[in-house]
């Protein structure tokens, strides 16, 4: 696709362009936001403003037009999410994010064929969420191939690709003004040493430093030469002085055909392995199972059961602040209506149910619900698109997690909603302990799939993970058997059945991707508490329940063994989104809980870690939280 690059001047935004090129996208323009004339730097939460005096040189080196806009807004909405959860999805007037909206509007007026926006975000949810919010309003695809990458490995890859950047601002422990203007390659040992000593971010994601790119082979058509600079002190100190480099005079020296030819022959930019080692092991385990005698004896087709769901009323279960509603469908008279009309009617019916069990606005409770399961009669592209359009009319920013399945003859909804006002009085201290947080990633990356509909990947408190299917994250396509090529491990080379399975079927790879996506989403999902802590699970999450939806029974027996005492449901359905063959839905708990004395509401809560307990049968309301 054709795309515009959001340029800060730093190494990340430029190195991301190499990955955009690697994935077949075409750069047509660059865009940037800068302080008003006469200011080198402003207190922006969203934009890198130092080095703006050299951005035009980078656009010149890229040989693309540059679109600029002055930052007029302020960081008004500083929370982890941006925009309202109510339908409409507009931004916050006066916020600096809206300057980006106006900038991209200008770009699209000149380049209406632009479909993507490149952004160099690595760890900043704050930046990613706001760029994605603006992109969604223009139906643009964010391209963030550095997202969630290991910073030590990423910095090494930048240097291996001969990216040449200099430090243009320092503000972290161990960095001093004399480091300004020093190349990234020369600073590499120091940055790794500071990372080992103090836990600083090697790529500067904690604000330790900012950079300015002088050359990025294969994408830059010229090299930037700094001819005159000036070091400016912002804050003096012995531990972490703040200073930046002002570019007073510089030029672009364009590369000749020989230089460009040599760069084109250099090693291509590396991309991270598709599977982590543990999930590569899962792939081999599934391949081995598919070649087993048991797998060959399973039926290849199951006659669908006749659904009686539409003749049954909705099921409603309340437990503390939780409301679970199932089997929400249209009336039999409306069963012949279009899918979009059925989706709309189902949501109106669901809102009527929620209104009977909450004192809040049912629209607000629905918009902030945790998980929705959408059953459609078919999942062909036109039906899926129509359903998503109707579905999105009920949600704004950070919509609920979702699973989408083809089953039955009409549209049906299930919903798990969180209504804090329903918290029992004796547990009222819990009301303010946890707030709703979302992980809503809409960018193409190597991390995990962007959402392919109006849903978030994860919603907390507790954490509901959207249904994960085995898409390739960088392209949002299903894998083929050739997506991971030999060499194989020695034991696979010696086993012809495993090799045959790997070379003729992508099911093993699809299964491994589903489990890896689920794991990565859990690790990145926010754990929200009253003190604002949003740290991810960090790999310590405890499954509460899992559900596998499949389109073929012969893969059910091939999953890895789940943890003991984790309820797991396997269901065979007609079809899944994008033609996937399996989808995993999971609810997890971090093991963290807030303890406080209910008789002393003002006491600070103690956050403790516990292993969630498994209960069967009737669950007392006292443990419902």
Image (spheres, rainbow, N blue to C red):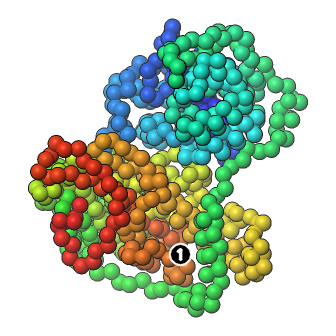
- Farthest residue in the right direction? 258
| Residue lying at 60% horizontally and 40% vertically, measured from the top left | 196
Report whether 350 appears left or right of 38: left
> Dot 1: what SS?
loop
x then y, percent, for residue 419: 20, 55
Quarter of the figure with residue 410: bottom left
Viewer-proximal residue among 333 and 448: 448
x then y, percent, for residue 505: 66, 74
Q: Where does label 1 land, which residue?
A: 560
| Residue lying at 74% horizontally and 75% vertically, measured from the top left | 492
Q: How many marks?
A: 1
Report whether 151 appears left or right of 226: left
Viewer-proximal residue among 7 and 275: 275
Can residue 159 be seen here? The reply is yes
Can residue 400 be seen here? The reply is no
Residue 184's place in the image compared with 426, above or below, is above
Quarter of the figure with residue 10: top right
Location of the C terminus (image quadrant): bottom left
| Residue lying at 44% horizontally and 28% vertically, measured from the top left | 45
Quarter of the figure with residue 279: bottom right
Residue 446's place in the image compared with 404, above or below, is above
x then y, percent, for residue 478: 59, 62
x then y, percent, for residue 468: 48, 62
Category of crowding for the residue at label 1, using alpha-carbon neighbours closer than 10 angstroms: few (below 14), some (14–19), many (at least 20): some
Viewer-proximal residue among 337 and 156: 156
| Residue lying at 53% horizontally and 65% vertically, measured from the top left | 514
């Amino acid at each position: 696709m054709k795309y515009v690059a959001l340029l800060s001047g730093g190494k990340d935004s430029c190195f991301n362009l190499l990955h955009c090129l690697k994935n077949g996208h075409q750069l047509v323009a660059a865009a940037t936001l800068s302080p008003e004339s006469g200011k080198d730097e402003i207190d922006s939460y969203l934009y890198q403003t130092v080095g703006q005096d050299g951005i035009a040189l980078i656009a010149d080196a890229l040989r693309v037009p540059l679109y600029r806009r002055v930052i007029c807004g302020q960081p008004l909405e500083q929370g982890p999410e941006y925009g309202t959860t109510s339908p409409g999805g507009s931004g916050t007037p006066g916020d600096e994010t809206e300057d980006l909206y106006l900038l991209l509007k200008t770009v699209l007026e000149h380049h209406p064929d632009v479909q993507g926006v490149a952004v160099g975000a690595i760890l900043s949810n704050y930046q990613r969420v706001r760029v994605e919010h603006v992109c969604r309003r223009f139906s643009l695809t964010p391209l963030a191939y550095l997202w969630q990458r290991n910073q030590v490995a990423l910095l090494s890859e930048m240097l291996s690709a001969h990216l040449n950047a200099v430090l243009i601002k320092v503000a972290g422990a161990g960095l001093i003004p004399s480091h300004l203007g020093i190349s990234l390659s020369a600073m590499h040992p120091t940055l790794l040493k500071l990372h080992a000593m103090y836990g600083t971010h090697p790529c500067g994601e904690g604000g330790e430093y900012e950079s300015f790119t002088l050359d990025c082979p294969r994408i830059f058509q010229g090299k930037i030469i700094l001819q005159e600079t000036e070091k400016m002190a912002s804050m003096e100190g012995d531990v972490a002085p703040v200073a930046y480099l002002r570019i007073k005079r510089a030029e672009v020296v364009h590369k000749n055909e020989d230089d460009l030819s040599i760069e084109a022959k250099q090693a291509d930019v590396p991309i991270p392995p598709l599977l982590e080692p543990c999930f590569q092991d899962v792939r081999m385990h599934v391949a081995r199972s598919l070649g087993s005698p048991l797998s060959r004896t399973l039926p290849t087709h199951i006659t669908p059961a006749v659904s009686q769901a539409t003749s049954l009323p909705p099921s409603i279960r309340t437990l503390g602040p939780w409301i679970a509603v199932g089997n929400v469908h249209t009336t039999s008279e409306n069963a012949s209506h279009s899918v979009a009309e059925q989706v709309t009617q189902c949501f109106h019916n669901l809102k009527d149910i929620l209104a009977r069990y909450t004192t809040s606005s049912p629209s607000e409770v629905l918009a902030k619900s945790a998980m929705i399961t959408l059953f459609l009669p078919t999942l062909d592209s036109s039906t899926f698109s129509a359903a998503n359009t109707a579905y999105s009319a009920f949600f704004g920013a950070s919509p609920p997690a979702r699973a989408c399945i083809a089953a039955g003859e009409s549209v049906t909804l299930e919903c798990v909603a969180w209504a804090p006002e329903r918290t029992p009085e004796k547990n009222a201290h819990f009301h303010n302990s946890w707030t709703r947080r979302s992980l809503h990633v809409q960018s193409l990356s190597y991390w995990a799939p962007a959402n392919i509909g109006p849903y978030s990947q994860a919603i907390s408190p507790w954490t509901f993970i959207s249904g994960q299917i085995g898409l390739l994250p960088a392209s949002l396509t299903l894998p083929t058997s050739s997506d991971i090529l030999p060499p194989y491990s020695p034991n696979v080379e010696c086993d012809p059945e495993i090799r045959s399975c790997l070379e003729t079927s992508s099911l093993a790879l699809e299964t491994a991707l589903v489990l890896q996506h689920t794991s990565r989403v859990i690790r990145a999902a926010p754990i929200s508490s009253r003190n604002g802590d949003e740290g991810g699970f960090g790999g310590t999450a405890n499954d509460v329940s899992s559900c596998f939806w499949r389109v073929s029974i012969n893969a059910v027996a091939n999953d890895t063994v789940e943890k003991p005492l984790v309820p797991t449901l396997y269901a065979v359905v007609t079809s899944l989104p994008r033609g996937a063959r399996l989808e995993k839905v999971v609810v997890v708990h971090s093991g963290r809980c807030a303890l406080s004395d209910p008789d002393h509401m003002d006491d600070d809560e103690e956050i403790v870690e516990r292993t969630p307990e498994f209960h069967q049968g009737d669950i007392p309301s006292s443990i419902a939280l």
